[in-house]
Amino acid sequence: MNPADIRLSALEARDLVQANGLSDALGWPYRLEDWAFAHALGDGLALRHDNRLIGTGMRWHYGSRFATVGMIIVDAAFRGQGLGALLVDGLLRQSG
């Protein structure tokens, strides 16, 4: 797998069905409504390969000095390449 084929971008509302599929694959008990709620309260990053969502990461701010991250998922076929770290680093960098 060529890492150049993977791009990092904003997690958008149109990604949530695929995001829910990623969490289902892990056995997480999230519904599409849970993803929509979390996305409405925060923002996130998406990893894409061939226009398919292969990773997610979300961030929620608590005032101007604190934030938390979660919903960090990388599709099983793409694990072991440092993509989870890429998501976390991107979220932290954007948080300031």
Image: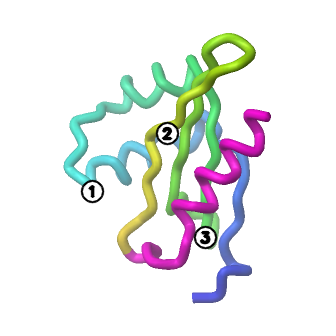
Q: Is the residue marked by circle 2 packed among few (<14), some (14-19), or many (20+) residues within 10 Å? A: many
Query: Looking at the image, is mark 2 or mark 3 earlier in the sequence?
Result: 2
Q: Which mark is residue 13?
A: none
Nearer to the camera, 35 or 83: 83
Question: Decide: marks 1, 2 in contact (CB < 8 A)?
Answer: no
Q: Position of residue 78 (x, y in %)?
A: 46, 75
Spatial CA span between label 2 and label 3: 16 Å
Left or right: 96, with 48 as reference point: right
Which amino acid type is shown beneath numbered disc 3? Answer: His
Q: Is the residue marked by circle 3 packed among few (<14), some (14-19), or many (20+) residues within 10 Å? A: some
- Name the residue beneath numbered marker 2: 16
Q: Main secondary structure of the magenta part?
A: helix
- Name the residue beneath numbered marker 3: 49
Q: Residue at x 68, y 42 (%)?
A: 92
Which amino acid type is shown beneath numbered disc 1? Answer: Ala
Left or right: 33, with 25 as reference point: right
Tell me if residue 81 comes above or below residue 67 in the rendering.
below
Query: Looking at the image, is mark 3 or mark 1 earlier in the sequence?
Result: 1
Indicate the secondary structure of the residue bearing disc 1.
helix
Write the start and end of the magenta stretch as one range: 77-96
- Name the residue beneath numbered marker 1: 25
Check if residue 86 falls in the magenta segment. yes
Indicate the secondary structure of the residue bearing disc 2.
helix
Check if residue 90 falls in the magenta segment. yes
Question: Which residue appears farthest toward the front when viewing the image?
Answer: 65
Indicate the secondary structure of the residue bearing disc 3.
strand
